[in-house]
Image: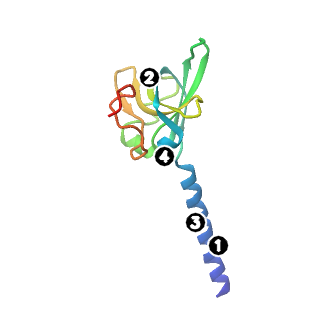
Amino acid sequence: MRTKFTVVLAGMAVVLAGAVASLQAHHAFSAEFDSEKPVTFKGTISKMEWTNPHVWLHLDVKGKNGQTETWAFEAGTPTVLFRRGVTKESVKIGMEVTVDGYQAKDGSHRANGRDLKLTDGRTMFLGSTGTGAPYELSPTAPPK
């Protein structure tokens, strides 16, 4: 009886530890990104990370000094993006794209991605619902 109780208790501890780690890893938009700092970059996709809880798109762009900079854009979950048509086949390394989003509060080369514009004119929404991200039609639109 005591062994069974110990096993159940240990199992509950593992589940609880996983839940706490998951909650700490996920964050609200406003905790990390600044809705007052919209960014738009045109560049080449250098890397895609299809991981949970968020997909990350890495874009090589020309900086103000003419040097290449790599920006990382956080997107929604892989499942959410797949449902919207953003797949490993539709967005590939080496593609030229334009990405709109909101810069990280710490000023790093990271941003929360909003729209991904392809050269054929299609626009794909990168954000995830319920993140607290600003609700507007474009990153440069005035606040409502």
Residue depicted at 59% across the width and 60% down the height: 18
* 120, above or below 124, in the image: above
**Label 2 vs 3, first from the N-terminus:** 3
**Label 4 vs 2, first from the N-terminus:** 4
Q: Amino acid at mark 1?
A: Ala
Secondary structure under badge 2? strand
Q: How far is the residue under mark 1 from the one under mark 4? A: 31 Å
Image disc number at residue 28: 4
Tell which tag, 4 or 2, sits nearer the viewer: 4
Q: How far is the residue under mark 4 from the one under mark 3? A: 23 Å
Residue at mark 2: 98
Of the pair 62 and 37, the residue shown nearer to us: 37
Image disc number at residue 18: none
The 10 Å Cα crowd at callout 4, few under 14, some 14 to 19, many 20 or more, is few
- The image position of residue 72, as x and y in percent, is 55, 31
**Label 1 vs 3, first from the N-terminus:** 1
Image disc number at residue 15: 3
**Label 1 vs 2, first from the N-terminus:** 1
Of the pair 13 and 86, the residue shown nearer to us: 13
